[in-house]
Amino acid sequence: MQLIDIGANLTHDSFDRDRDAVLARAREAGVVQMVITGASREHSPMALALARQHPGFLYATAGVHPHHAVEYTDECDAEMRALHAHAEVVAVGECGLDYFRDFSPRPAQHRAFERQLQLAAENGKPLFLHQRDAHADFMAQMKNFEGKLGPAVVHCFTGERQELFDYLDQDWYIGITGWLCDERRGAHLRELVKHIPADRLMIETDAPYLLPRTLKPLPKDRRNEPMYLSHIIEELARDRGEDVEITAAHATAATRTFFRLPDAA
């Protein structure tokens, strides 16, 4: 069973002490490739650097998360464009809107999102999207670029039924994380994941965040890491009523198509 983690924040400082061991454990758990999330001016170059150290195994995105939207200046835009000149950078983002936290003012979020959509329209790379509590405005901004963008994935989907079907109506991909395993917040996803077409479904850990709460035993430090992707795919397959090998094969094929990844070495 080959798995690909489409969203791991491996530049996070919690991995500084044992990053190589984390990668080794992921391989042992069947994770054959990973996409490292670039979500700020600081971490997008770090994601590329990490990917270049592990060719064929790690890839990167480059973008600015709505939490960091105030960073998105003309200088930042030039930096992102330079990062996207590298083949290891396979998607624009993480970008989008987040009204749940509002760590950046909403006008700044809209401007940063608009500029990254423009970048994706120009370079043709897929979009790695974030949306939380901002669905209507998010859809409106995406609609402004209708017909100009390549494929898009709504990463770490945690929304409700109408949001899911709005995304699927656009032929966007859906990223499912360990949120599925959270009985407090993610129980509704158990039913919704049955409706995601096999060729639009991808999996991710969002490590070090979103540790699956159904893991037994839970790690003492509560840090999520890519090796737990195998646990997420088992839960996802059960909820979809599929054999885990089938779910994994479909998710891996969808991921390779979306990010244009070669077969793992």
Image (spheres, rainbow, N blue to C red):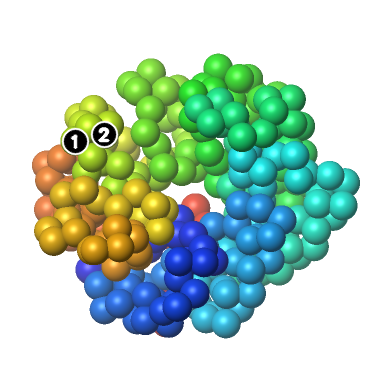
Q: From the viewer's perspective, is 178 left or right of 100?
A: left
* Residue type at the position of mark 2: Gly
Q: Is residue 4 above or below residue 63?
A: below
What percent of the width, then of the height, locates residue 130? Answer: 53, 38
Q: From the viewer's perspective, is 106 left or right of 12?
A: right
Q: In the drawing, what numbered circle is on residue 186? A: 2
> How far is the residue under mark 1 from the one under mark 2?
6 Å
Q: Is residue 98 above or below residue 50?
A: above
What percent of the width, then of the height, locates residue 141? Answer: 66, 25
Q: From the viewer's perspective, is 36 left or right of 144?
A: left
* Residue type at the position of mark 1: Glu
What percent of the width, then of the height, locates residue 229? Answer: 29, 60
- The residue under the point 61% across, 52% down is 39
Q: From the viewer's perspective, is 56 left or right of 44?
A: left
Q: Is residue 35 above or below residue 214?
A: below
- Tell me whether the residue at label 1 lies in contact with that at label 2, contact meaning CB atoms closer than 8 angstroms: yes
Q: Which residue is mark 1?
A: 183
